[in-house]
Image: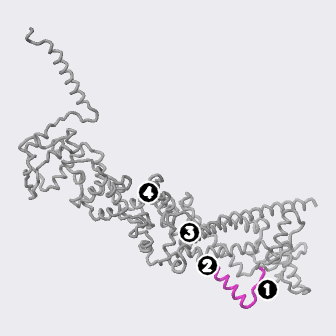
Amino acid sequence: MREQIMNSTTQTPAIRIIRFFQRFTLAQRWEHAILFLSFLVLLLTGLPQKYRAAAWSQQILATPEQVRLVQTIHHIAAIVLILEVIYHIARAIYLMARRSLPGDIFVTWRDVTDAGQMVAYLLFLRKDKPRFGKYNFEQKVTYWFFFIGIGILVISGLIIWFPEAATRILPGSVVPAAKMAHSTEAIVAGIFLVIWHFYHVHLERFNLSIFTGRLDEDDMQTYHALEYERLAGEKSGSDGGGQS
Amino acid sequence: MAKYKLWLYPLIWLAAALLAVGVLLAVNEPGRASPPTQETEAYCLGCHSNPELSMTLPGGEILPLYIDPAQLAESIHSPLGIECEACHTEIKTYPHPEVTVSTRQELSQAYHLSCQKCHSTIYENAQDSVHAQVSADNPNAPICTDCHGSHYTHPPDEPRALISTTCSNCHAQIYQEYKDSIHGSALIEEDNPDVPVCTDCHGVHNIQDPRTEQFRIASPEMCAGCHADAELMGKYGLPADVYNIYKLSWHGVDVSVYKARWPTVWHDSATCSDCHGVHDIRSTADPQSKVNAANRLATCQKCHSGVSENWTDAWTGHHAISLERTPLLYYIEVFYSSFTPVVLWIAGIYVVLQIVRNTVDRARRKPR
């Protein structure tokens, strides 16, 4: 995908030009919205099923019909999430085939050194943060943690949804294993989401770019300096595409 | 006066006194009923000890009227002084009043009400039983005397196996299954004191219908009564944690929830007896056991129709997670029990460091 510098806006009193940079396409924003909603519903309907002995769970799962209803909602949300995952991967494969898959999200050695420098900075051993590209290593950790986590949840979820069918191909021991993996992974992913992702997008700075699709020049310079330079450089035409 | 042998008088007094003390002791002997008030037995046996004695009831049945004095003397009631008239209250003398019932069944039903006079609690319990419930439609439903006998009443559990044979009078097919089961064979062949007899699971006088939701939901706990008793299971080299591990299983969690919340709603999750059998429970090592490896798939397929051979391994048995038995589950547990804290602690510490550093940076920037 080609990032472009979006339309500038002018402010009336003092002339100040705020430039916005496109960060996410509309399709990517929709993907995030679907992922967010389906994950939330899955978590809300999954937790009472995991903690069935707890009093709060029994308020929700008050009758056998209620249990079936909650399970049905969980399954519907799961289908939505699975469709999203299929779309996401299919699109990546399609772009890869056309050799136009942007490589920004893949982990490089640079991310490891960035992480080391960032930790040094956090421990007051360095004065400045490392300069990041389009996605800093924290964002890559978020993406890949959920990519793998959702993979585990989808596979284990399908096994415990259709255990009889699954054991036609797979050994029987995958069923209790999937049950354990599903409920444990969901908790890990949920807690990680709250600690890591919520901090980075709500507290560190209120980052709405996944909903608006764009980031202003200040944020680009502060948090994605390399990407900013690349885009700004491309704009001015002075320096061509050094991938960061 | 010499001819009256005065020296004999004290001896006579002594003999009389001893006799009086003896009578008093005999009368006040603890545990003994009050002195017999109805000395009817000898009187009645005057006629009823005749083996030939019988009568034809209005319905056409022949009612034998013979009472074996020897057997009567060994029964529990007669030696306690509870004699004929205690139950046959309407018969005071000969000739007897007219017989108003037409069959032997009706006669028993009329007379078993007299059990209530002394055994009122037990009688009440029996009125709550499934036997009493079906008696309206089924004239063969048992009443007191069908299990305990009428004239020759004995302790019903001496020996213990007697209980099972008493039930077998009607439930013959179930007795056949039970007789060959691990519980039944130990009872009948070894007079084992620990295995359950019919009444241990079904109750004694207030026996309930075992096909109800309530019986089904309570049944695993019933098995646990013995099978979670470490001391008792230790005697036979059996594990006592089977019930606790079951409660963590897919089936067991479901059953626990239904038991706690909806005990009157039918549930389809497997209970002990769904897999192990009911009266025909056998040792898992027995090739005829429903849960023996040879039969396990067929047992699973009772509920999970058409599942493949692999399916049986989805059940981890009543075993805790271990490397030997359930390696996949073991490694997943090891993975998550190390991965989870490591990842969450690193994420947590990293975020805290970020908050600290950002706050310090902001504070440094301000004075400028």
Mark 4 or mark 3: which comes first in sequence?
4
Is A204 colored magenta in this rendering? no
Mark 4 on the same chain as mark 2? no
- Give the mark toward the camera: 4 or 1: 4
Task: Let me know if marks 3 and 2 both belong to one chain.
Answer: no
Q: Circle 1 sits on which residue?
A: A2
User: Which residue type does callout 1 highlight?
Assistant: Arg
Secondary structure beneath label 3: loop
Image coordinates of residue A242 in percent, x first then y, are 86, 84
How far across and how far down the image is residue B107, in percent? Answer: 15, 52
Real-space Cα separation, disc 3 to disc 1, in angstroms: 51 Å
Viewer-nearest of labels 3 and 2? 3
Q: Which residues are magenta?
A: A82-104
In this view, the residue farthest toward the bottom is A98
* Three-letter code for the amino acid on which mark 3 is drawn: Thr
Question: For numbered disc 1, what is the local secondary structure?
Answer: loop
- Looking at the rendered image, the quarter that the N terminus of chain A falls into is bottom right
Query: Same chain for marks 4 and 3?
Result: yes
Disc ID at residue A82:
2
Q: Which residue is mark 4?
A: B236
